[in-house]
Amino acid sequence: MKLIIGSHVSFNKDTQMVGSIKEAVSYGSNTFMFYTGAPQNTNRSDIKIDLIKEADNLMKENNIDKNNIVVHAPYIINLANSEKSYDFSINFLKQEISRCEKLGINKIVLHPGSHVGLGEEAGLDNIVFALKEILKTKTNVKILLETMAGKGSELGKTIDELKYIIDNVNSDNLGVCLDTCHLNDSGIDLTNFDSYLKDFDKKIGINKIGCIHINDSLNPISSHKDRHANFGFGNIGFNTLIDIVYNPIFENVPKILETPYVTKDANSKERIYAPYKYEIEMIKGKEFDKDMIEKIRNN
Ligand code: FE
Ligand code: FE
Ligand code: ZN
């Protein structure tokens, strides 16, 4: 089976996707995900058209299919709370979608939102209203709602919540991005992934899954924490994650690592080394390397 795999990479204003592609290729990836600017703010530089041709050539040289590249919307967008920066969030997501169109990217991952005290029902209805408004404009870009850990008042933490949004927005431009760390933290037993998929297929449809974030979790099942761990180094574990990566149902679905950078040494808090080249190597070899973190530090 072919493997479509990559990681989160950077995107800076000078090199834009050309820089992202070079970074992805250095990890052995054949896809990647990026934020069009800092994830926690909305400062965005203009898309440079002249870099797009260069990016297209680089992708061709490295067998990267543009259809597998994913943008992640910034987390400050919150479509669930209509009392706080709601119009801003709607407009900013519209702009992100048009940036995706300029870049030729057709998938954008979105955290559905947090209701912040309004209640789940009102929060879900706010998300539905906002997405309907955003998708009034015809686009090739698919919005992928991410499965959330259920931290604070996050919505999209159950299949039923995602189903409610998807059914009510009723658009071909809406899909789902699974995140294994979030699923674990939300209460899904990933050692029994087939039963989750069965339920998902019955309620939403497996064909709606457009991306998978493959992260381990620092916390046990149902912890509602959302803290990512390196692949195989958390509570989900290597074999369970490998089974998900190599599930033939997802052969054509991009798998993206959002695992944490490795610290300089065991006592340091400063995360400086990207783990992705090593993690992708382990995933391709299907064999866990318990010394991976040490190897990264010593390299
Ligand atoms: Fe996310
Ligand atoms: Fe994620
Ligand atoms: Zn997360």
Image (cartoon, rainbow, N blue to C red):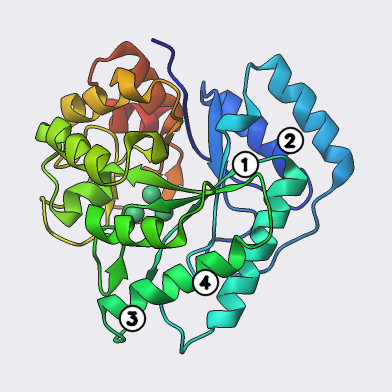
**Residue at the (36%, 15%) spot, across then down:** 284
| Proximity of marks 2 and 1: CB atoms separated by less than 8 Å | no
Q: Earlier in the sequence, mark 1 or mark 4?
A: 1
Q: Earlier in the sequence, mark 2 or mark 3?
A: 2
Q: Amino acid at mark 1?
A: Asn
**Mark number displayed over residue 106:** 1
Give the CA distance from mark 4 to mark 3.
Answer: 12 Å
Give the CA distance from mark 2 to mark 4.
Answer: 33 Å
**Residue at the (18%, 62%) spot, across then down:** 224
Disc 4: residue Cβ within 8 A of ligand 1's nearest atom:
no
**Residue at the (65%, 55%) spot, across then down:** 97
Q: Nearer the viewer, mark 2 or mark 1?
A: 1
Disc 2 target residue = 18
Disc 1: residue Cβ within 8 A of ligand 1's nearest atom:
no
Disc 3 target residue = 122
Residue 45 x/y as whole percent:
76, 60
**Mark number displayed over residue 130:** 4
Ligand 1 - quadrant of the structure image: bottom left
**Residue at the (53%, 62%) spot, across then down:** 74
Residue 248 x/y as whole percent:
32, 18
Give the CA distance from mark 3 to mark 1.
Answer: 29 Å
* 162 relative to 84, above or below: above
Give the CA distance from mark 1 to mark 4.
Answer: 19 Å
Answer few, some or many: residues within 10 Å of disc 2's Cα (few below 14, many 20 plus, some between 14 and 19). Answer: many
Answer few, some or many: residues within 10 Å of disc 3's Cα (few below 14, many 20 plus, some between 14 and 19). Answer: some
Q: Earlier in the sequence, mark 2 or mark 1?
A: 2
Q: Amino acid at mark 2?
A: Val
